[in-house]
Amino acid sequence: MTKEYNITLGLTAQEISSIQNGEITKFHFLPTNDVEHEEKISVSIKQVSEDSTLSECMNLSVDKYEIIS
């Protein structure tokens, strides 16, 4: 079975400008008291060359954390 992942990242004009200027390289989406989800998502951005392989351009890792008390 082939897995397909689709990601849409909504960015403001200022965030896009900051990426172009090298000021932003990572976004963190963390749960707050205002939302129902508990997932923590980080997206890193890096520059690659035109002939880069898919594995050089993209990496997906999923970690499950367990709280031990």
Image (cartoon, helix red, strand yellow):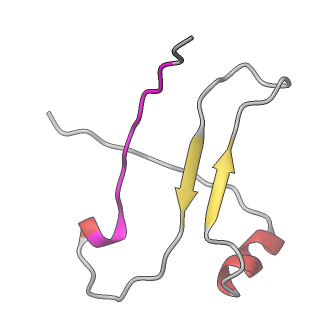
To which quarter of the image does residue 51 belong? Answer: bottom left
Residue 53 in the figure: left or right of residue 60? left
Instruction: Give how far across and how far down residue 62 sits, in percent.
Output: 39, 38
Residue 69 in the figure: left or right of residue 19? left
Whether 9 is drawn above or below 68: the answer is below
Magenta-colored span = 56-66
Q: Quadrant of the N terminus?
A: top left
Whether 55 is drawn above or below 1: the answer is below
> How many labels sit on residues?
0
Q: Nearer the viewer, residue 68 or 66?
A: 68
Instruction: Give how far across and how far down residue 63 sits, in percent.
Output: 41, 35
Q: Is residue 57 magenta?
A: yes
> Please, which residue is most extreme toward the front here?
69
To which quarter of the image does residue 59 belong? Answer: bottom left
Q: Quadrant of the C terminus?
A: top right
Residue located 49% across and 75% down the image: 46
Residue located 39% across and 83% down the image: 48
Q: Nearer the viewer, residue 11 or 35?
A: 35
Residue located 72% across and 74% down the image: 16
Whether 53 is drawn above or below 31: the answer is below
Residue 27 in the figure: left or right of residue 62? right
To which quarter of the image does residue 67 belong? Answer: top right
Residue located 66% across and 23% down the image: 37
Instruction: Give how far across and how far down residue 49 sits, in percent.
Output: 36, 88
Whether 6 is drawn above or below 15: the answer is above
Q: How would you classify the magenta stretch by its main secondary structure?
A: loop
Q: Is residue 6 magenta?
A: no
> Please, which residue is most extreme toward the left here?
1
> Please, which residue is most extreme toward the top here?
69
